[in-house]
Amino acid sequence: MKEKSGRLPVWSRFLLSTALLTALLAWGLVLNVNTGSVDIPAGEVFRLTGGALRAAGRDLLRGGNALETLISASTESRIIFSIRMPRMLLAAILGGALSVSGFLLQTFFRNPIAGPFVLGISSGAKMVVSFTIIFAARFVSQVSSALMVLSAFAGSLVITGVVLLFSQRARNMSMLLVIGIMVGYICSAVTDFFITFAKEQDIVNLTSWSMGSFSGANWSGVGATAALCLGGLAAAWLLSKPMGAYALGEGYAQSLGINIKLFRAALILLSSLLSACVTAFAGPISFVGIAVPHITRSLLGTARPALVIPACYLCGAVFCIFCDLIARTAFAPAELAIGTVTSAFGAPVVIAMMLRRQRREQ
Amino acid sequence: MSYFETRGLAVGYNGQVLIHDIDISIEKGKILTLIGPNGAGKSTILKSITRHLQKIGGEVSIGGRDVYRWAAREMARQVAVVLTDRIRPELMTCGEVVAAGRYPYTNALGRLTAADREIVRQSLERVHALELEDRDFSTLSDGQRQRVMLARALCQEPEVIVLDEPTAYLDIRHKIELLDILREMAREKGITVVMSLHEIDLATKISDYLICVKGDAIDRFGPPEEIFAPETIDRLYGIRHGSYNLLFGSVELTRPAGPPEVFVTAGAGYGIPCYRALQKHQIPFATGILFENDVDCQVAGELSEHVVLTPAFEPIGADACRAAEDLLVRTKAVIDAGTPAGALNRPNRDLLDFARARGISVYPGWKEYLRTLS
């Protein structure tokens, strides 16, 4: 029945796409770990990883620190386990989170250029981070990375709260979009105000933070983000039924029995939590959240949230891993900001998608 | 037995009452249509019934139960809607759009069972759109879209369907098809239909009950044949120029003003195109002699103040002939609309001879007459 339209059934297409993305992810993971200033052969990577997993298992069962001994045994294993692996895992986890967050907001606003930061979350995070860098540094001897993470997270959540408050009163989506953008402007104004009093070094730090990077990755960060983001992913997936109905517009969604206000709040909260997590650990990474949902939908040929959400996470992970690889290696030893790479690759994708969509509509 | 009821319903926005004391009561499986001018509040009433808008006072009940007390899921199982919102779902097939109607029945993940899929297919079949199941919704025409949206509402298996101007954007063929489907649904499945329509002619034909919405209260409520006096429509819509013929559902534009310039002999429908052509050129005219049951009367009366009538099924009397002659001598020309002459309408033939004898030009049709003007 579907063959006459020349299209694969939705499910086969989903399985095919997922298989492709998983293969790419696996390839990207290996590539990411063995490339860099020190090239480590893939076989060596597998051997070391296998050994580490066994050691970790032994530690878990009998106690002891076989894992640590193994890691510090050679330079190569130190590079792999302390630097490259957490960084690559962080890129994968956060890239997926960013994409799902973008997908949620695109569904929410029914607007293809909505992204994770359209509600002003990155501006809010930047505001608090700039405060921390510029003022808190005068009282604390050293601004630790944990403090930065906390600042960014706090900033994101404050803005989420403000937007949530408004969302209960806004009658339609475009009003909420305008509120998000305006709140973003206010935060930028406050940031600029702080910058007036900043030292030159502070400005440099702030700029490099706001371009985003996965270079600060460590194992505790990976654990925390994995818990938050995978939890968020599961929650988003559980919302896929109302999200599907929401595609018909708010009027129809309501008549199907969806509590619009509650659903709005859940969607905003979830998407904000995911992007706040990204912002806190890697800075506001642009374009992933806009571009990846588009790529995923085109790949799957459907907008069914139950299928798109997991595929979107996978696709985002692949996208970010390769972008980070480029960021790390393209101009080595200099390292590019991740935002530079994602924008350079993401923006053309968005333009191409828009043009294709326009052609299809004609 | 009344099934769908509103008692003292007051509706409006932000606590401001727009229309109050709406009392409706119809039986199961009937079709109720709201008519009234733009901005009268038809949509506001419908939205308050479907709970898209919070009512301000009064009560809405279905099957004797208060709609506003229902949980969202129960509401969704009882009442389905077709809105005026033009939806633009991305990458959704018609089947998926229709399947959204199963929402209040599926599990937490929205998985469709075989039974659900069967209902989706049946709904599409009922609106004659089964062949559209795998088509991308965004590629449909307006007529197809509206049918699919109706299938989506049916798929919800409601007791009541509320439609806000379902025929907007549709051409006449699709309007008829859509209303036929609604009638069939009401009759066969006992679904109660509440809707608003712009086309009064269609509304009177499809509906079991009509409500005229105007001002801050319901103007009239009842079966179409009961509530329509000839001027009801003109008054309801505040038509000052032009008129609406309820019997035929036809609209006439503004009547030309001034003393009659031509006299038209007509009858048996030959006059109507001629009257409308004269109206188009804003030429005031007189016409006669028409039997009171003649179809020409319906339009002549709307477009001219000078119509000579005579009782039906009787030969034309001397009075009517004299009245026609009086009007005729005041005009500059006579148009013979082409009505065949028979035993009863011979005086119309005589009128033409009368005109010729007076030196008034007689034209064998309105085209010939209009040609002399240019």
Image (cartoon, helix red, strand yellow):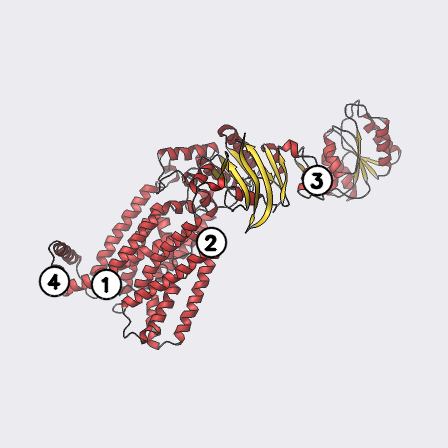
Q: Which residue is the extreme one toward the right?
A: B358
What is the number of the mark on residue A218?
A: 1
Identify the residue under disc 3: B243
User: Image check: B148 left or right of A98?
Assistant: right
Identify the residue under disc 2: A173
Which structural element holds mark 3?
A: strand
Task: Give, as a three-letter code, the residue at label 3.
Answer: Ser
Q: Position of residue B138 (x, y in %)?
A: 46, 44
Q: Chain of mark 3?
A: B
Q: CA distance from mark 1 to mark 4?
A: 18 Å
Which structural element holds mark 2?
A: helix
- Label 3 near label 2: C-beta < 8 Å? no
- Check disc 2: other Cα within 10 Å, few if <14, some if 14-19, many if 20+: some
Residue A300 in view of the camera? no
Q: CA distance from mark 1 to mark 2?
A: 39 Å
What is the number of the mark on residue A69?
A: 4
